[in-house]
Amino acid sequence: MKKENPKSWRNDAYAKVTGRTKYTDDIKFPFMLHAVPVYTDSVHALIKNIDTSAAEKSEGVVKVITWKDIKGALTFGQIIKDYQIFAKDKIYFNGDVVALVAADTRANALKAAALVKVDVEELTPVLDVEVSMDPNTPLIHKEHGSNIINKHVVRKGNADDAFKECDIILDEVFQTQFIEHSYMEPEAAVCNPRHDGVMEVYGSMQHPFSTRRFVASTLGCSLAEVEVIGTPMGGGFGGKDDTAAIVCARTALAAMITGKPVKCSYSREWSIRESYKRHPYKVYYKMGLTKDGIIKAVNCKIIADGGAYCSVTPWVTWRSTVQCCGPYQVENVHCDTYGVYTNNVFTGAMRGFGSPQMNYVVESMIEIAARKCNLSVIDIRRKNMVRQGSITITGQNLDNHKVAMEETLNTVLNEFDVENKLKKCSYGKTDGDELYGVGLAMSYRGMSIGAEGVDFNSAIINVQPDGSIILETGIHENGQGSESAMCLILARELGVSLDRIVYRRPSTSTIPDGGTTVASRGTVLGGGAVVKAVEDLKSQISKFLSRKYNCSSEKFDIRDNAVYFEKGEKSFNEVIKEMFNSREYPHVMGVYRPPAVSWNEHNGQGDAYFSWTYGCQAVEISINKKTGKLKLLNAIAAHDCGKAANVGMTLGQFYGGMAMGIGYGIFEEVKIKDGKIINDNFNSYRLPRATDMPEMKAILIENPDPNSPSGAKGIGEPTNELMAPALANAIYNATGHRYFKLPIKVKIEEEEEVICRRP
Amino acid sequence: MQTTINRKVYNIPDELKELKLTEYLREHLNLTGVKNGCEMRSCGACAVLINNKTMRICHSTVNDIANCEVLTIEGMENEDGSLHPLQQAFIDHGAIQCGFCTPGMVLTAHALLLSNHSPTREQIRKALQSNLCRCTGYQQIVDAIEAASVYYK
């Protein structure tokens, strides 16, 4: 085994591989109660009465909690406060919770939950985005004044005029589906009302600070009176914010009211029913080109189904807007993007965050265009792609980092022999039974959250008297290995060995609010803060030595656990001991504030992100002509990750992202019938399994980003946003037919022809 | 009834025979490496070895392990607490991310390697078919199992 040179290191690997890791559902407190949620059968309805009397008399029940018991605010939300922690007057979707039953055992709580009676007056559900946008459709949230949650635009050049001069105009409509994050660990919360008056919250949530806001709002207390403890989490992928936080908020309310610790662990069915999904998009996309294949104009209308609540729909759709032309330079762009309320399950953050939908559209369009222009799918990309110094469609000059679009494309072309493979594609014709296809897709992606919000983070380095180091950052361990990345960056930057570093998982009470661990920002923002903290610590140590030994603080370095300064060399441990003896704490908090971004909401222009990352993926498939069965043969990804902090875990992001992209492309869909989810567990929701997956090759391209102190770029999401379009293109190249809807299900006609619309 | 769990013999009172096996292991024995992922026998997070065969136990009761030898992830490491080479391989190959599927994955792989000392990658994938992982894309899990197979020969 590769013990002599491990390519992967995790601080939590031993605990996880031995089953010792305590996830939220594994945590127990003495006298702990168990809580379960109560739903209704309705999708859209007025609540007439909620009768909890029978449930309250049921065996073991301590309390049945409804909206009446909320001490703080009934509704909360990250952008619009429209989410009812408990439904009061109205059911907005089938996952709304009307009550929480707290009992001595989970079994007793479940029995009682079935006894809660809710009288409703059913309303007609609005389940289609375009129906919802019709001014004649009744309002879902009256107080919002419109069924349109938000609108974003891009106005660049003059698209209408430019189309008149185009040789080729393409006009297509694409649709994408709801998908489920499918974190292996369902939502769970354990809340302990502490004797110091603080509500202690353990939860399967990826945003401790966001969770704290939800809990404090529901309890009607200050942020300081809630301590959310970072807890090992069984996956998030963007999906453990709102719902996970709401589960914590309800559980905390139960703990507050009963005065006892309360656990609420979700079943998979509850999790899929209640938690938000990836936004389905309907995209009208018009592209105009010269006969040489230069894209001159794009006009697109993007409609996102936000479902019953706003969640982060305005932010998700903002990224779609900024990236609506993919990694291509287009002089004339007219884009209108709408987030829309319906009575479907609500939608929110999911790995990719508005880009997987648009990449599917744009990377399909570019290949449709290639055929119309008689160009290869590679040449048309080269003609239009962003390069060093390009101006994006929002007017941002790509000049503050290496633009590696062509580098990632060339890497995939060379490593995967794409040009030769393209020649072998079947395009619907084969002598044997198997149709063969290879497909390509590429993207660029703005790093971190961009102009969506305030972006900064902190790291605390606390060196102990014996030279060992405790590190905390404002980034949460979602399972991706962020704690390990932070430790590795600290060891590398400070010049000390990894074995002296211990990561202390912070709580919301021990470190400043570092924002949410989303947007592929963990390594960039957390690592950036670690580098800043190392700079501060080195400065502190050098100044100390300069004072003590009356020498310059300039000639100073730390390498291999040794401190070098003008008067000689000392071990790191010795210097730290001297500092403590001189009443000086080697303790720093570093803060990283990324470069400023800008955005004009009226014309959709601005420096949307402080830096960008680039990636390209390809996949080879075969499709049986008789059965339509699709087999994935091989897949490859090349992404610029700036500088990889932990190679094994970075590769893991590639492979996991590609797998999720494959699921999005051909397997996954949350099926909704009359507003109710029908595939609410993994026996019916189709996830990629080990036997579905091809062998994958991951290539890390490293161009350290000058805007990121650790050099790292985020790659969690870029790796997830390209397999669906690569598959769509591979399926076209195999069958000769273009699919405009995800997930793609290859259909076989009676005469063994594959049916679909012609491009 | 009597059963052996992680090499220790247990005499289980009759009134617990109808209890869900996951609840018995998790709540009574504190063996929380057994996970509730779907309770539909679809995700493999609850997989343990019963007489060296992988079993997804979320639909099982305590009665189902009468006179059996059960191995959970807590019994996988060596007596001295050092890791089994298969566990070490999972670490070295980056096969662990969130870790929620890891106990089921390790145990399923262990059962495979006990019966097949040199499986092909395809056979490894087939063995993992009933275990879901959302983080890794399975690639590094397959790598780890392939590398660990030498220790079973």
Image: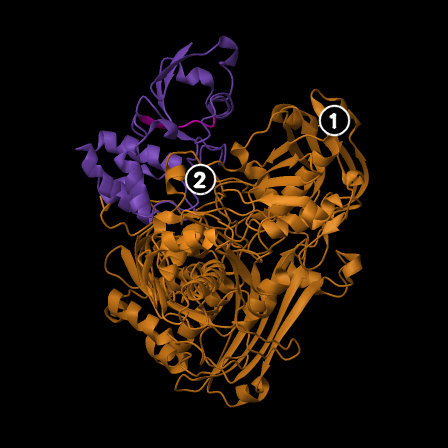
Chain that bears disc 2? B
Q: Quadrant of residue A701?
A: bottom left
> Residue A165 in the image: x percent, y percent?
51, 90
Q: Toward the viewer: A467 or A598?
A: A467
> Residue A15 in the image: x percent, y percent?
40, 38
How many callouts does the rendering have? 2
Residue B42 in view in this figure: yes
Q: Which chain is orange?
A: A
> Where A499 sits versus A552, above or below?
above
Q: Residues within 10 Å of mark 1 (few under 14, many from 20)?
A: many
Residue B130 in view in this figure: no
**In the rendered structure, does residue A484 fall within the stretch colored magenta?**
no
Q: Secondary structure at mark 2?
A: loop
Q: Toward the viewer: B105 or A513?
A: A513
| Left or right placement of residue A459 versus residue A128 in this view | left
Residue at image coords 37%, 51%? A573
Q: Which chain is purple?
A: B
> Where A122 sits versus A431, above or below?
above
Marks 1 and 2, how far apart in space? 34 Å
In the image, the segment drawn in magenta is B53-59
Q: Quadrant of the N terminus of chain A?
A: top left
Q: Toward the viewer: A302 or A407?
A: A407
Amino acid of disc 2: Phe
Chain that bears disc 1? A
Residue wearing tag 2: B100
> Residue A581 in the image: x percent, y percent?
46, 51
**In the rendered structure, does residue B55 fall within the stretch colored magenta?**
yes
Q: Which mark is residue A55?
A: 1
